[in-house]
Image (spheres, coloured by chain):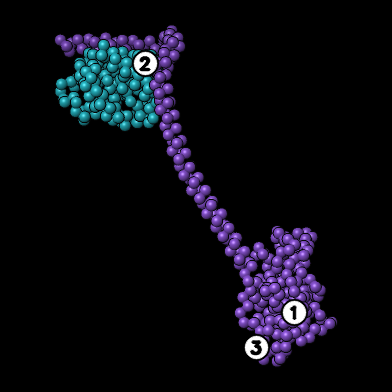
Amino acid sequence: MDQKKDIIILTILLLLSILFLVLNSFDSVKLIKNIGLKFISPASRSVEYPFKKTSELYNRARALRNLLENNDKLTKENKKLKKEYRDLNFLKKLYNELVSDLNTEDFNPGKLLPVKILTHSPDRYFSELVVDAGSSSGIKKDMAVIGIKQDRWVLQGRIDEVLNDYAKVRLITSPEFKASAKLPDGKRGIIEGNAGWNLTLKYIAPNVNLKCGDEVYTSGTGGILPGGLYIGKITNIVKLEFATGQEAEVELFEYPHNLGYLYIVK
Amino acid sequence: MRIILTFIIGFILQSLLYRNFPIPLNIDIMLIITIEISLIRDSSSAEVFGFFSGLVEDILFFGMWGQKALIRTLAGFIGGRFKGKFNEGNFFFQLIITALIYIFAQFLGLLISLIMSGKSIYPPNIILSALLNGLLAFFVYHILKRFNAV
């Protein structure tokens, strides 16, 4: 009996379903559908509204949580970066100090031989002089000749010619004297004599910021003259045309002629 | 009365899942409830429930009138054939029976669309959707049973 009832209900419902399906193909039903949709849509939306809002609220809460997590993460990263920045600044400062120390590294005199100036030839006053020591004292060509003033070792020239008991010194003021020099920031150039009281610092790159008063030292490049020997101060800067570089006039810290004794670096 | 409440809750859940389900799988809550009614009560109740739930869904979700009504009526009828023959609360029974009816419903839906409009859209991930529905059916069965909702 139940099964019969079941079959009857099924048949009725299936027929109704088929009827609805068939109704779909009529234009008038389509019109009814459209009109119905106009009423049903807001109803459907209003049913969905609280759930949609709840869902939105949940999503916002999740986004807020993510935002807070991201904020925490960023705060930590910011702290880390600040620390790294401080460390970097400290290292930078340390590096600059080290570079500065390196560039102003004091000349280590090592073994020096004091010599007395014997002669100054008036016609080669800025070019050379003779000292009272020669090969018998272990002096060799190209050895550095230095002087001392106010506890600073100053470059005066190099040995140019050696005899048994005498040696000729090529003075720093001689046009034939050339040596590699460096500035306090480590930039390099070539110092040349001018047969006058002042020297010229040449071949300075155009981007080097030269200032009057900058101290000039020997760089030690080439291995003939030791590095760190004081030469003098920049007194004038000449920018060369066409950005080919710049030159500077250097006032020698002390002139060889003013010193009673010179020292030869062995 | 209880069955009407189940209908309303099921319908609300269904409408929410329609638009907000995050993965490309289809969950048919009303079909699951129809099957569970056929297993817990009898097939005629399930057929009536399936018919009206399908019809309301067709109208409210702008579908083809009668399509879901017909499918769910048949689903209720088929579900009722298994009543009392197996342990209905068993997980695997629920999984298999719901998955099979789901697949049947999908193909029937395709067929009706094809006949009525000449075009049909193949539902995505039909097997995975069937398994997901089967999985949910187990819980829906126990919830309905626990609250004596149908």
At a point 35% along the width and 14% down the height, the residue shown is B56
Q: Name the residue under label 1.
A: A259
Task: Say which quarter of the image contains residue A223.
Answer: bottom right
Residue tagged 2: B58
Image coordinates for residue B3, horizontal then vertical, percent: 26, 14
* Residue B29 in view (yes/no): yes
The residue tagged 3 is A138
Q: How crowded is mark 1: few (under 14 residues within 10 Å), some or many (20 or more)?
A: some
Name the residue: 73% across, 85% down: A116
Q: Nearer the viewer, mark 1 or mark 3?
A: 1
Is B51 left or right of B88, judged from the image as shown? right
x, y (%) of residue B108?
31, 21
The chain identifier of the residue carrying mark 2 reads B
Tell me the distance, in whole angstroms, between the alpha carbons under discs 3 and 2: 115 Å
Q: Which residue is drawn at 28% across and 13% down?
A: B4
Return the residue nearer the eye: A191 or A184: A184
